Amino acid sequence: MASNKTAAKPAAKPATAKARLAKIFGAVNVGSFRISAMIMGETETGELLVLGSGHRASQGIKRGYVTDMRAATYAIRDAVERAEKNAGTSIQSVWIACSGAGLSSRVSNVEIEIGGRRIEEEDVEHLLIEARDMIQPDGRTVLHAQPAHYTLDGAHGVANPRGLHAERLGVDVHVMLADGAPVRNLMEAVQNAHLEVEAVVAAPLASGYSSLSEEERELGVALVEIGSDVTNVSVFAGGMLLGLRAIPMGSGDITDAIASAFGIRRFQAERLKCVSGSAIASPSDHREMIPVHGPNEGAEEQSGPLARGADDKNRIARAELISVITQSQSQLSGEIGKALKEMGFSGSQAGQVVLTGGGAELAGLAEFTQSALAMPVRIGRTPALTGLPEAHATPGFAGLAGLCLYAAEDPVDIRSVGSRFTTGSNFGGSFGSMFAFGRWWRAMREYF
C-alpha cells in the first residue's frame, strides 16, 4: 500500500474519554445478507475509536448488486441510523464497499528517465502523471489507481524516492476496475438515504486492511472473503492486491442446500447452519438429534409438516445436516482452489490463506479448507479496536472495520495528481476521479 500508517493505528493505546476527535469517518458495507454501518473517530493523537456501529437484514441487494432501489435505500438508512444512535452523533457522508460489479485488478509499471540526478518532488509528480495517463479503463469505472512501490533503476521496494539518485524512476500502480452501472446504482441507493458518498472502495481492499498484517501483504497471502452470495478470492504480494476472482457462490448457497435437502424454510435452514452446523464431522453426530423448529417459532409454524427425514418430534440427525454442509462447502472450496491456481497461488507459490466474511464463521471451516486446499488456513478477524462491540469483533464485520481503517488512511490516488502538468483527463467513463481531486495537496504533503 502507499502508506504504513494503518497497520500501526489499531495497536495504539486506548484513548481516554477526554480525547478530542480530529476526524469522524462513516462506513457502510452493503451485503446480500446484512447491511452494516460503523462510525469511527480519530483523535488528535492519531488513535482510532469506534464510536458506534449497527446492522440490519439486507434488502434490495442480490450477489452484490442493487436489485430494488427503494428497499436498498431504506435498509441503508436504517443501518446508519442504528450506528448514529449508538455513537450519539450523526454523519453526512460515508465510505461504501463494493463486492460485486465485476471487480477486476491489475498492476502496471511505469518508468521515467532521471539521468542520475537527485529525485525531486516534481519528478515524483511527473511519474504519477505518466502512470495516470496510461490508465485504460475500456469504458469501465476506475475505483482505485494507487502507487504501491517505487523502483530505482529497476530495484523494487522503495517507499519514498525523494532525495535519492537514480538513472530511472519507476512506480508500480495498482488499478481496480468495476462495471459502471452497478456502482452507480450502489451510490444512488446511498445518496437516496440522504448521505454523501466519500468514495467507493473495493471490498477485498477494505477486508485486507483489517484481516491481513502488513507483513502478510508484503510476503504474499490469499484472502478469501465468503459473503452470502459472492466469494471474493484475492491475492496480495509486494504490499498490493495482485489478482482477484469473484465466485458467484457463498454461505447463502449452503443455507439453500439445507433448506432443499430437508424441505424446510430458509430461515430454519440458516438457524440450523449457524447453531448446529459444522464443516467437520464427528463420531457423535449420528447419535445427536437436533430440532428443526427454533424456540421462538410460533405454534402455526411448529404445527407445519415434518422436515424430510425427521422423526416424530421434527428432529434430524446432526450427521445428515453436516453431510449437506460439507457437500456444499466442497463445491465452494473447489472453486476457490481453481481461482487461486489461475492467479498462480498454488504449488511452491502458495502460502497462507485467510478466510473472512460472514461465511467464515461456520464452525470447523478453517480445518476443512486447509485440508481441501492443502495450504495453511486461518480465520481473519476484526482487529482489536477501542470501542468495537464484542458482537462485531467477528469475521462477518471485518470488511466494515477495514473500510473505516481504509478511510482513516485515505491512500493517495494518482488521479488526483497533475495540477502543475495537466488540466485533467477523461478516464473513459470513470467517475472515480471526482473523489480524488479534493485530496491533492494533503496527499502530496503526507506521502511525498
Image: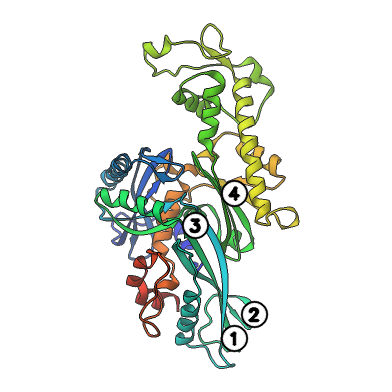
Please identify the quarter of the rendering in which residue 64 is found.
top left
Residue 168, numbered circle: 1
Question: Given contact means CB atoms under 8 Å apart, are the residues at marks 4 and 2 in contact?
Answer: no
Residue 354, numbered circle: 4
Q: Position of residue 335 (x, y in %)?
A: 63, 43
Q: Position of residue 72 (x, y in %)?
A: 33, 42
Judged left or right of residue 362, residue 337 is right
Q: Earlier in the sequence, mark 4 or mark 3?
A: 3
The residue shown at (47%, 83%) is 126
Tell me the residue that label 3 is attached to: 205
Please identify the quarter of the rendering in which residue 31 is found.
top left
Mark 3 crowd level (few <14, some 14–19, many ≥20, 10 Å Cα): many
Cα distance in 3D space between marks 3 and 1: 30 Å
Residue 154, numbered circle: 2
- Could you tell me the amino acid type at mark 4? Val
Q: Earlier in the sequence, mark 1 or mark 4?
A: 1
